[in-house]
Image (tube, rainbow, N blue to C red):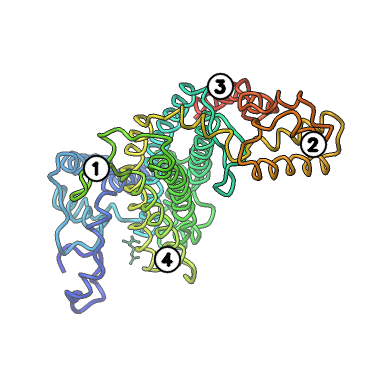
């Protein structure tokens, strides 16, 4: 069985059906640079332990270098008999340096500790690229907020008008979760960096006096697995990564849902740029928010990847089981999905324009200043329970009259309660309402300006 990593105890090679089922090169081939880096560090460890002569060590490094160059040039391919990236690269290394020297590299390691390390290294790189893409979107949201610091809009709960807010406040409310996702990736990385499984062997550790910490350091990890069984069988690092990507998907989906609503004829709060929206093959007038819809759709896919991986892991006894080969595709897919999706969402948001007149016109509608009336009464000494009743009575009166709160005359207000003097009009404007929410975290323009600075300095820390 040419190119196989075993054979001594087998009288015949694997059936084609087994080979077809077993093969993972179509998805794990992209781990090649990480596998080569691991092999380099491993060769150095063997050399330091006195298990490789200077000449063999140099020859192995040369061979690994050649494979790396060929991979970068697109000139290195697995064959259909290779089971996985590790086996394929060993075969290709043997072709390059001969079986005598090449055959020494596998000593003291197993594909089990190898793959557990490489998968971590791959994810650490992509955590960094996804973080950078997230920070781009945070930056665009912050820029949009800054450009609309004076714009008011109806704030909603239950999708019903609730209280007026600044558009900037609302946009920043989408930026903070994305910034927390960047923090999640950073926390995840610190946990993973502590744990290079190289040296765990197949499950029980290695006998050859290799130094796992030196290998770890060479691969950019600060520590190595304290337990070789855990090192080879744990995949919580992959599940946690898949969770963070699913959370990013959910955060993008909630933003996307609002873009979809806001660009409807009924809302008419925002317009999409032509280059970031699509048309219809039959309806000439259509302008569709496809990026937002794909963001919402792909959130389901990201959640599915997490759920699928967790289902794969839940019943596995220690240590390595072949089921674990199923860990990579869902997580690779989550990485590829976000690396495709985030730049599109960022471009869509960057080019979104707002119908600020429409937002301002709707901001006071739906009795959204009723809380302001109640809180004004509280400041006048009325217990909140009564104030709430009186403001509610004003709303009921408006509904009878078919008008909005600021339209009530002084007499109509006084008829609801003598406490409702004409001075209440001070809070019956959107700008007065918004400015009065001036506690930390509130929507008052002065607080939102501070919030923007706070967001920018937090994102500069990443
Ligand atoms: N390709 C496998 C994986 O992705 C690693 C190989 C371990 N296989 C084995 N029979 N011990 O998990």
Residue 38 at x, y = what percent? 34, 46
User: In the figure, residue 428 lies in which quadrant?
Assistant: top right
The numbered mark at residue 453 is 3
Q: CA distance from mark 1 to mark 4?
A: 57 Å
Which image quadrant shows ligand 1? bottom left
Tell whether circle 2 marks a residue whose Cβ is less than 8 angstroms from ligand 1. Answer: no
Q: Nearer the viewer, mark 3 or mark 1?
A: 1
* N-terminal-most mark, 2 or 4: 4
Please say whether residue 50 is visible from this viewpoint.
Answer: no
Q: Which residue is mark 1?
A: 285
Q: Nearer the viewer, residue 394 or 7?
A: 394
Q: Is residue 310 left or right of residue 418?
A: left
Counting other residues with Cα less than 10 Å from the Cα at mark 1, is it few (<14), some (14-19), or many (20 or more)? few
Counting other residues with Cα less than 10 Å from the Cα at mark 4, is it few (<14), some (14-19), or many (20 or more)? many
Looking at the rendered structure, the secondary structure element under dot 2 is helix
Tell whether circle 4 marks a residue whose Cβ is less than 8 angstroms from ligand 1. Answer: yes
Q: Which residue is mark 2?
A: 415
């Amino acid at each position: 069985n040419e190119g196989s990593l075993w054979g001594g105890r087998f009288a015949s090679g694997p059936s084609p059906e087994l080979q077809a089922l077993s093969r993972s090169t179509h998805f794990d081939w992209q781990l090649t640079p990480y596998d080569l880096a691991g092999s380099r560090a491993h060769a150095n460890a063997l050399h330091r332990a006195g298990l490789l002569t200077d000449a063999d060590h140099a020859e192995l490094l040369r061979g690994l270098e050649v494979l790396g160059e060929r991979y970068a040039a697109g000139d290195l391919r697995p064959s259909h008999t290779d089971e996985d990236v590790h086996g394929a690269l060993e075969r290709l290394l043997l072709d390059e340096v001969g079986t005598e020297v090449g055959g020494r590299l596998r000593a003291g390691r197993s594909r089990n500790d190898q793959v557990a390390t490489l998968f971590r290294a791959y994810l650490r790189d992509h955590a960094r690229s996804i973080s950078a893409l997230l920070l781009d979107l945070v930056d665009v949201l912050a820029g949009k907020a800054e450009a609309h610091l004076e714009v008011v809009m109806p704030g909603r709960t239950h999708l019903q008008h609730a209280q007026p807010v600044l558009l900037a406040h609302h946009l920043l409310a989408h930026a903070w979760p994305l910034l927390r996702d960047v923090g999640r990736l950073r926390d995840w990385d610190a946990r993973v960096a502590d744990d290079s499984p190289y040296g765990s062997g197949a499950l029980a550790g290695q006998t050859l006096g290799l130094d796992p910490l030196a290998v770890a350091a060479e691969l950019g990890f600060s520590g190595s697995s304290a337990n070789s069984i855990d090192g080879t069988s744990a995949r919580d690092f992959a599940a946690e990564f898949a969770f963070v990507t699913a959370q990013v998907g959910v955060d993008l989906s909630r933003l996307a849902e609002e873009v979809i609503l806001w660009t409807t004829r009924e809302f008419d709060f925002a317009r999409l740029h032509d280059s970031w929206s699509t048309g219809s093959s039959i309806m000439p007038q259509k302008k569709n928010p496809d990026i937002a819809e794909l963001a919402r759709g792909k959130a389901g896919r990201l959640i599915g990847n997490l759920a699928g991986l967790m289902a794969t892991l839940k019943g596995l006894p220690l240590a390595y089981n072949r089921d674990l080969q199923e860990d990579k595709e869902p997580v690779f897919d989550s990485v590829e999905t976000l690396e495709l999706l985030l730049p599109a969402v960022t471009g869509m948001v960057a080019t979104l324009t707002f119908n600020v007149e429409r937002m301002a016109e709707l901001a006071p509608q739906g009795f959204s200043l009723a809380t302001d009336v109640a809180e004004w009464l509280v400041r006048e000494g009325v217990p909140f329970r009564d104030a709430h009743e009186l403001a509610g009575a004003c709303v009921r009166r408006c509904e009878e009259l078919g008008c909005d709160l600021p339209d009530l005359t002084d007499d109509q207000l006084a008829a609801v309660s003598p406490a409702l003097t004409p001075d209440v009009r001070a809070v019956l404007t959107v700008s007065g309402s918004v400015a009065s929410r001036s506690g930390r975290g509130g929507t008052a323009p002065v607080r939102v300006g501070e919030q923007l600075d706070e967001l920018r300095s937090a994102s500069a820390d990443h």
